[in-house]
Structures are given as structure tokens and as C-alpha cells.
Amino acid sequence: MPIIAFVLGLTLLTGCAIDKGTALAADFEEDWAGAPDVAKIHTTKDNTLPFLGKSTGTLILKDGTSADSVTKLGNELGDYVTRHDKVTGRITADDITFTVVVEERRTREVLALWRSLTADDQVVNGDIDDRPWKGTDRWQIEVTTVDATGAMAVFKDMVADGDRHRPLSNVTSLEVGTEHGVRPRLSVATGFDGGVPAEAIAAYEAVVAQYSVVHASLQPDRVGIVVAESADRDRAGELARRAAPNLGAAVEVTSDSGD
């Protein structure tokens, strides 16, 4: 009985819920209910220990919400997460989901990237998430495109400050891939530290310039390429290894026939 009384008393004195993540999620839904342009609210909760926990709240916006309205909501959500440090705020608009952070500069950058991605006809959907690591700000971005040509174009643009998409200023882990079911399939990704798979891209481009590629996966430390059954697999392998000499045995070229 004394222990129960102590716990109940602590709850009343601190105003904290035992399942804090659940309480934060409920507060988020209540606070954003009826907000302009918000079609749905999705929350998750993490009740790690009694009185400790966190929550993620996502505002799913109505179709056709203007860019100005998205920016306004992004700024308002930024103010909200500043006041609620155990809440992660996210917005889904035009099939792109992004995390709003406390720092205004980073929020401006992610809103600008949201604008450029939604305006790009090659992009189907995407996710821009805040993933800090050992005290360092970093982003994790996943983008889906309509085809392999679009995947490579979007990837190169995003890592090299191209014509359409400005890279975010903090370390960014990026993966761009084709939509599910699309052939040829392509996935191209940076390393965890943002390192670009330059040799893997060179190997892929050397092969695709001469042969039909069914599927390819490109990363900084390895490359996997599947050529069409009619292609000369051995010759394609030679081309790939010559273009990526530092990857050595991490260059794998196979045939769609299963060989």
C-alpha cells in the first residue's frame, strides 16, 4: 500500500502519466485536431519506463494543400516540438513525409527539399527523417522514382547540388530506388556517412551503356548488377570491374537466367 500511494502521489505532483508516450500521443491528437488542411493524424507511442517515453505525431494533409500552407504548418509544428521535447513531429503532403526539427534553419532546408521533390515528375514518394547519431545532426532520406533513369537522375541531383534538389547541409544518408514492380529495377544509396558510391555508379553506367540491365543495387562498398539473359555476362562483368577497380570482389554481375 505505501508503494502504491507513493506512485499515485508522484503522478499527481509531477503531472506525468505513467505511460508518458501514450499521453504525449493523445495530447498531440487533441492539440492538432481540426487544424486547417489536416486530413488525418497518425501517432505512435513509446513507453520505455514508468513516467518516461516519447511519441511521434504525423499530420497527413489533404490532397491539394498549397505549398504555402505546408510551409505554415511546418513552422507551427516546429514551434510545437520545441515546446514538447519528447515529441517528434512529421508531415505527409503530396506523398512526401518529412520530419520537422527544432532548428529553424534545418526546417527551412527540409521544406525546400519537400517543395522540389513534389515538383519533380520523376518522384513517386519519399521520406525525409531526422536521424541524429552520437550528437551529430543527420538526415535519412528515401525516395522512390518512376523508373531507373529517374532514380539515377534524382540521386545525382541530390548529392551534387544539381538543378532541382539542393542537398541538406548536415550529413545525409540517401537511398533512391524505382517503384515496386518496375523493371528494370535500380537502387542507389550513399553510405551511412553520406559517402557517394562513385565507383558503383561508374560500373553500372559502363554495363548499361552496352547491355540491358534487369536489376542493379549500388552502394559505396559493393555493386550488384543483373543483366538480361541475352547479354554477355562475362563481358559485362569485365566492364563493371574495370570501371570499379577498388571494389574488387564486391563487384557482382549475374544473368537474369539465374547463372
Image (cartoon, rainbow, N blue to C red):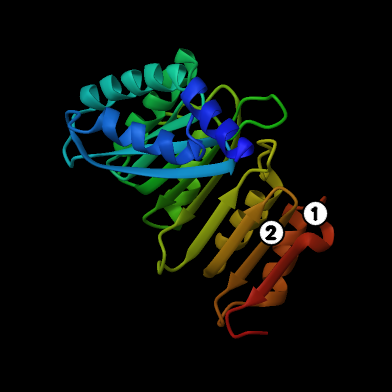
Residue 200 in sight here: yes
| Relative to 214, residue 154 above or below | above
Kindly identify the residue that appears in the image at 72 percent across and 29 percent down.
Answer: 134
Which element type, helix, strand or loop, lies under badge 2? strand
On-image quarter of the N terminus: top right
Using the image as rendered, state which of residue 62 and residue 195 is in the foreground: 62
The reply, left or right, for residue 73 in relation to residue 193 is left
- Badge 2 local density, few (<14 within 10 Å), some, or many (20+)? many
Describe residue 254's horizontal placement relative to residue 251 as left or right. Answer: left
> What's under tag 1, amino acid-wise?
Leu
Residue highlighted by disc 1: 247
Query: Between residues 195 and 47, which one lies in front from this camera angle?
Result: 47
Give the CA distance from mark 1 to mark 2. Answer: 8 Å
Mark 1 vs 2, N-terminal side: 2
Report x, y in % for residue 60: 28, 41
Q: Which mark is residue 223?
A: 2
Q: Do the residues labelled 1 and 2 touch (CB within 8 Å)?
A: yes
**Which amino acid, by three-letter code, is at mark 2?**
Val
Task: Answer with the quarter of the image where residue 135 lies.
Answer: top right
Rendered image quadrant of residue 28: top left
| Residue extending farthest top | 104
Which quadrant is the C terminus positioned in?
bottom right
Residue 202: x %, y % from top left:
65, 50
Q: Position of residue 239 (x, y in %)?
A: 70, 62
Q: How many labels does the image show?
A: 2
What's the residue at 55%, 82% (across, down)? 230
Q: Residue at x 30, y 36 (%)?
A: 29
Residue 90: x and y in percent read 39, 34
Q: Residue at x 38, y 43 (%)?
A: 43
Q: Nearer the viewer, residue 139 or 165?
A: 139
Left or right: residue 258 compared with residue 72: right
